[in-house]
Amino acid sequence: MTLRTRHWRTFAAVILAAMILAVVAEGSETDQVEETAEIADSRNVFDDSWHGVKTLAHDTAHILVSPFRMGKRDALQLGAILATTGVLLIYDEEIHSAINRNAEEFPLKPMVEVGRFLDPLGYGRMNVFYLGGLGGSYLFRWETGEAMFGQIITSFVVYGLLKVPVETIVGRARPYQDQGAYSFGNDDSTSFFSGHTVNVFQLATVVSHHVDRTWFDVLAYFSATCVGLQRVESDAHWPSDVFLSAAFAIAVSRGVIELHEQRKVSVMPTMGSQGAGLTVGWRF
């Protein structure tokens, strides 16, 4: 099976299933406020495209500078993540060796196989499919799909802007380069970020948010974990690379989703025969 065929089959199987589940979840919500047909009919592809570009630029910039707006809780969470990364960094070689020694044993073997199957979702070239999903959702006026694919693309853009400078500065050698776990500052060494891990965890975070089912959350993050495990087993990354990349991916995508949710809700004061009140509206 060629790599291109694997891309298509993996994307079709995973994204199609997620889209169906998102439709089911959307249809089961009884408190959603639907936009009127007149609003839908007034769509203009050029105006909407320009609005989408501006929204992408705004959200990307907002996420990139978010570390400067950290509160106490965020700082504590970041500290815990960095501390865990530090511990993994100390034991990177031991954990990596243990995974390779037991790669043919249960439960690692089936997890690695799942990771290999889903591995194509980690390639940056998959963005063309997500752009297609966004365009198709717009064409058929599936607003949940527009939000989902838009958030996936925004998350990927944030990562894409940081990828080259971070990899250049860190310059960490990959396991297969046989330079050990503590070889940093090298040219053409890109062990951190783990791009596959970032992409699949961002995908899992956004899609599970829209499917909004606990069992799907478990399945999505388990699948993403399998891809991360496979990246360690294949000598492409160290465990600390995978862990910190996953934490980064989840944080970015949750930030993107939060921005979208903030734009959805509006609160307007009202005055009626029974007195004053508030009207809460949602934009999907």
Image (cartoon, helix red, strand yellow):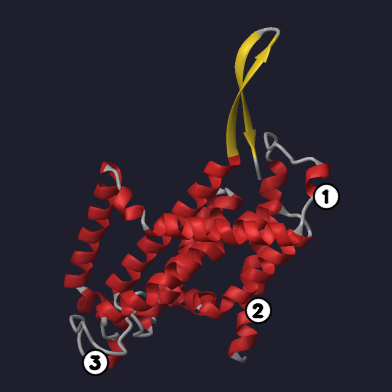
On residue 178, which mark appears? 3
Can see residue 153?
yes
| Tag in front: 3 or 1 | 1
Q: Residue at x 39, y 79 (%)?
A: 231
Quote the CA–CA distance across marks 3 and 2. Answer: 34 Å
Amino acid type of the residue tagged 2 in the rendering: Arg
Amino acid type of the residue tagged 3 in the rendering: Asp
Residue located farthest toward the top when viewing the structure as drawn: 274
Q: Residue at x 62, y 54 (%)?
A: 147
Q: Rate crowding at label 3 as few (under 14), some (14 to 19) or many (20 or more) other CA atoms within 10 Å.
A: few
**Of the residues under marks 3 and 2, which one precedes in the sequence?**
2
In this rendering, the answer to whether 274 lies above or below 162 is: above
**Of the residues under marks 3 and 1, which one precedes in the sequence?**
1
What quarter of the picture does the N terminus occupy?
bottom right
> In the rendering, at what x and y percent does residue 64 appear?
39, 60
Q: Secondary structure at mark 3?
A: loop
Give the labeled residue for mark 1.
Answer: 41
> In the rendering, at what x and y percent does residue 201 appear?
46, 64
Q: Residue at x 32, y 82 (%)?
A: 100
Quote the CA–CA distance across marks 2 and 1. Answer: 35 Å
Amino acid type of the residue tagged 1 in the rendering: Asp
Q: Indicate the quadrant where residue 152 lies.
A: bottom right
Give the labeled residue for mark 2.
Answer: 9
On residue 104, which mark appears? none
In this rendering, the answer to whether 20 lies above or below 115 is: above
| Tag in front: 2 or 1 | 1
